[in-house]
Amino acid sequence: MLELLAEFWGDEANVFVVGDADQSLYRFQGASIENSLSFIKKYKKAQVITLQQNYRSPQDILDVAHLLIKRNALSNGEVLKIASKKIEKQSPLVSTIKTPTKKQNIEVASLSSDISETLYIVEKIKELIESGVKPDEIAVLYRNNADSFAFEDALSKWGIRYELDAGANVLDTPIIQQLLLLFQVIYGMRTTQEDLDLFTIMNYSWSMLNTLDILKIARAAAQQKTSMFAILTSKKLDGLELENREKLLKFIQNLLHWSQLDAQQTFPLWVETVLNESMMLPWILEQPNAIEMVNSIQSVFSEVKRIARGDHTLNLEKFLAVIATMQEHHLKIREEKMAYTKTDAVKLTTAHSAKGLEWEYVFISRALDGKWGNVRSRDLISLPQGVLKNTDIDEKDQNEDERRVFYVALTRAKKHVIITYAEKTVVGDRLKDTTRSMFLEEIPKKNIFATDIRAFEKAVPVLVSKLLQIPKDIQPQLEEQEWLMGLLKDFVLTPTSLNTYLECAYKFKLNVLIKVPRAKQDYLAFGTAIHKALEMFYRSLMEHDLPPNKEYLIDQFELALKKEILTKDEEEKRLNQGRKILSAYYDRYKDEFGRPVFLEKFLGYGWSRVYVDDVRIGGRIDKVEWIDQKHNLVSVVDYKTGQPKTRNEIEGKTAHSDGNYKRQLLFYKLLADLDKSFTLVVKNGVFSFIEPDKQTGKLRREEFELKKEEVDDLRKTIKEVMSEIRALHFARTTNYSICKRCEFVNHCWPLGIPTQNAEQMKLL
């Protein structure tokens, strides 16, 4: 691409290129030193400006970093030599940071074992925080994501908040390992040969089973030389004195039920069912670190939906096979990034992800040969000859890329670097001697301070006992309130989210903010396909100034429905339903189809953001129609599938209606009035019901004038609701009739929905 542009521009090209060859880490994303070399060689007249001042690190850290990186045959120095023959060698960067002359800012600690190393780092972090250093000015860098687990565990036990870098493999997280083991046990129900795994999942906290009951069953199975499953599904259970026999039976019945249900539901819906009915998800939502666990679940659920979109026959067996293949080939399901405000938390991250970031105190952990330098290379695809025109792979030190990673890690520190390594590490069931990183050998001894850790090693046994304790109340990585405030930072209130909050504030929290994993119900998939068919129908009308025929409308529906994740039975049922109602819809309105003004019109997004005071709002309108083109008057139209509502129900004037529908139209009117990119005047709002009324068999279209005083009332509601949301008021609804149709009913009311007496019902 650059060559094509340069050829087009010629000698008059005005190109500004920025790069640092010493920090070219992401070669797989195109960040290779080859880019710098090829640019300089190809464009010999290019002016090269070197930046010599560093505004981050003390001079002694910069000096050591320079001593390391100059060992690379391919570095900034090489680039500069090519650019100008006058430059024989590159000097270290000059620090603008003033530090005591004799102070050494690079510390190396050699610990007896990897456990001692972990404890040393955590204790040092504790000391730094107690001395007044902010936690978010401390980072622990490691070479591989798997190295984070020991630090996560120890920091939790010490009550030190930490922030884990996004992108870790969620398949390695404890809650996902529990979920996958549950899936394996359910799949194993077909052979009932899963005793150890069954025993394991029965002991998980979310199972809510009595631990002594589980031990009694395991003991009975061992004595009778049979399986736990056989004990639980036979009369042999009657002879045991159990605390809660019914719960145990229900647990086994659920496993068998889920095994059968796998063939009856779409896989995303099946996963959602298991998460809720097993009480795993309700249990997660009550935990101190619910945010992190929900995010892990959501990351896996997103992958489930992605696979299901490509294979509508996805089931438990296929999914477990996919996971097994991923684990065999070390493939990841990356943790989705969470939105949050900056918190006082220690950062845990790989050196690669640390690029571009900085902290006062940086720990470079596990500085061992094979991790930092001399990394065993996997069998990779050889690059075709001639791809690297400026790099001689044969002459290049194979550790140059690794040295750049270590260079980046060193230069993240604004004050101090602590490099740690263990003399012995646990491999399987034995201790193995280690060799420290080659890069430590390349640093002159005079440039580093070797820490005396003898006193610390004596205290290790006491610290280990603390590490082995089960924490009573683990401090979550990110406080829930701070995290929720982070989600609200760029939050856009829509008609749906407003109505959700007014219906149940707690449901708003789970569904809109946290986005608890949910499969798309078949009626929602049906509604999506109907909307898409109507959109494509009217787009064709706009393009050709002629309504397409009925077959086109139905074909578009069928194409859209096939993209949804449905079982064969659901797909067949919804196909027949859609063909029938769209045929009737076409016949009813075939003489009235007119050219729309807009389709799927977004308001409040892009450059024209819309605010009610300081509350940002937005929405999408299905269709905009002309009322009076001369006076720029239009109607907003919203399609509705399902049983049509009466005018009084739409306006909230009946005993069991809430006015959500009318509020939606008023919201669109408010958006149109405030959006500067929308120059028309919305006068009316229309609901076009796609399905016929069951009593009359007729299609209904209800139109309302949207009055200014109603819009003004909506403004007040929006400000009041957003004030409640920002105050993080997320109480459960007291209108329990709503709970009966809510997907979170088992989470909110595991013992059943409270009964409302007559007086309560009057108030409602």
Image: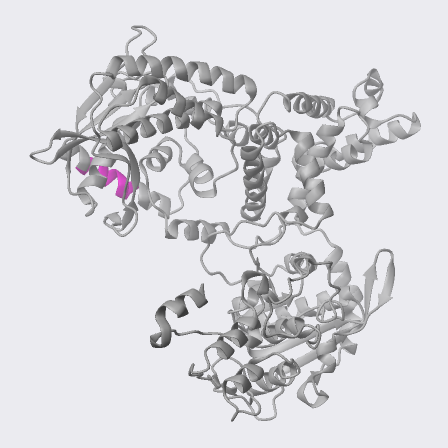
User: In the depicted view, which residue is nearer to us: 143 or 246?
Assistant: 143
Note whether 344 is above or below 207 in the view shown.
below
Position of residue 113 in the picture relative to residue 393 (left or right)? right
- The answer to whether residue 719 is magenta is yes
Residue 120 picture location, percent across and down: 71, 70
Q: Is residue 412 visible?
A: no
Q: For residue 66, what is the image quadrant?
A: bottom right
Q: Is residue 144 above or below residue 454?
A: above
Residue drawn where x is 77% and y is 74% of the image:
436
> Going 70% across and 25% down the picture, which residue do you hit?
255
* Position of residue 431 in the picture relative to residue 389 (left or right): right
Q: 521 or 329: which is nearer to us? A: 329
Q: How is the image coloured?
A: one colour
Residue at the far top in the pictured view? 696
Image quadrant assignment for residue 22:
bottom right
Q: Position of residue 428 (x, y in %)?
A: 84, 56
Q: Quarter-wise, where is residue 602 in the image?
A: top left
Q: Position of residue 471 (x, y in %)?
A: 67, 52
Residue drawn at (70%, 76%) of the image: 397
**Magenta span:** 712-720
Asked whether residue 454 is in view, the answer is: yes
Left or right of 584? Residue 20 is right
Query: Would you say the magenta stretch is mainly helix, strand or loop?
Result: helix
Which quadrant would the N terminus be assigned to in this image?
A: bottom left
Image spot of residue 95 (x, y percent):
51, 86
Judged left or right of residue 236, residue 734 is left
Q: How many marks?
A: 0
- Picture quarter with the C terminus: top left
Residue lying farthest left? 630
Residue 598 located within the stretch drawn in magenta: no
Looking at the picture, tell me which residue is in the foreground, 227 or 324: 324
